[in-house]
Image: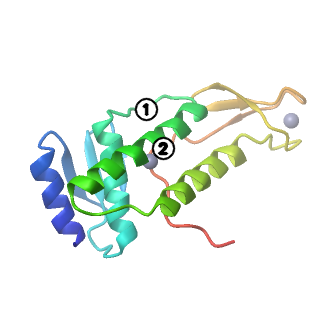
Amino acid sequence: MTLEDLAKNLRQTHTNIHLATADTFYWSPSDKTVYYDSRDSTTEGLWALLHETGHALLGHTQYYSDIELVQMEVAAWEKAKELAKEADTVIDEDHAEDCIDSYRNWLHRRSLCPACHLSGVQIDNNHYTCIFCHKKWRITAERFCRPYRKIVA
Ligand SMILES: [Zn+2]
Ligand SMILES: [Zn+2]
């Protein structure tokens, strides 16, 4: 199955979802559109499209705490597995786990105090504070737009 075949299939079975091409895979709650990179012909590309469509169908929007973001990643992969079944394909379990882990690691890194490197406490959508040195820092507003390939350290 090609990415375009899958996009066509998703458009037919989920007529309420908008799909459009872009430079990467992401779900945009503001314009209610799932973007996908049509140049990506890998299996991971198919899985990424299913995953982002999962976010869309679950109605995931912005403004959540980091803990909720991880829960939404897990939920989006669960939904993606259902969508895969509908489209007669299967998502590799290890791939979903790796993606959730890398997402978790990314959130963990940004929760660390830039001054003393201890784990901070999130105070609102865009800020963390350190309970040890009282430093406050800003985090990016970036949401459902993470690289899905495993980063080789
Ligand atoms: Zn996601
Ligand atoms: Zn600190």
* Residue 93: assigned label: none
**Residue that numbered label 1 is attached to:** 62
Residues under labels 1 and 2: Cα distance?
A: 13 Å
Give left or right: position of 78 versus 119.
left
Compared to residue 41, the image places residue 146 above or below, namely above
Q: Secondary structure at mark 2?
A: helix
Give left or right: position of 108 versus 32.
right
* Residue 73: assigned label: 2
Name the image quarter holding the C terminus: bottom right
Residue under the point 57% across and 42% down: 140
Assess disc 1: are there few (<14), some (14-19) or many (≥20) residues with their C-alpha within 10 Å of its C-alpha. Answer: some
Q: How many marks?
A: 2
Give amino acid for label 2.
Glu
Assess disc 2: are there few (<14), some (14-19) or many (≥20) residues with their C-alpha within 10 Å of its C-alpha. Answer: many
Q: Can you tell me whether the CB of the residue at mark 2 lies under 8 Å from the nearest atom of ligand 1?
A: yes
Residue under the point 11% across and 43% down: 15
Percent coordinates x, y for residue 40 in the rendering: 33, 73
Percent coordinates x, y for residue 110 in the rendering: 69, 44
Q: Which image quadrant for residue 31?
A: top left
Residue under the point 21% across and 58% down: 87
Percent coordinates x, y for residue 78 in the rendering: 40, 45
Q: Secondary structure at mark 1?
A: loop
**Which residue is nearer to you in this view: 49 or 125?**
49
Say whether disc 1 or disc 2 marks the residue closer to the N-terminus.
1
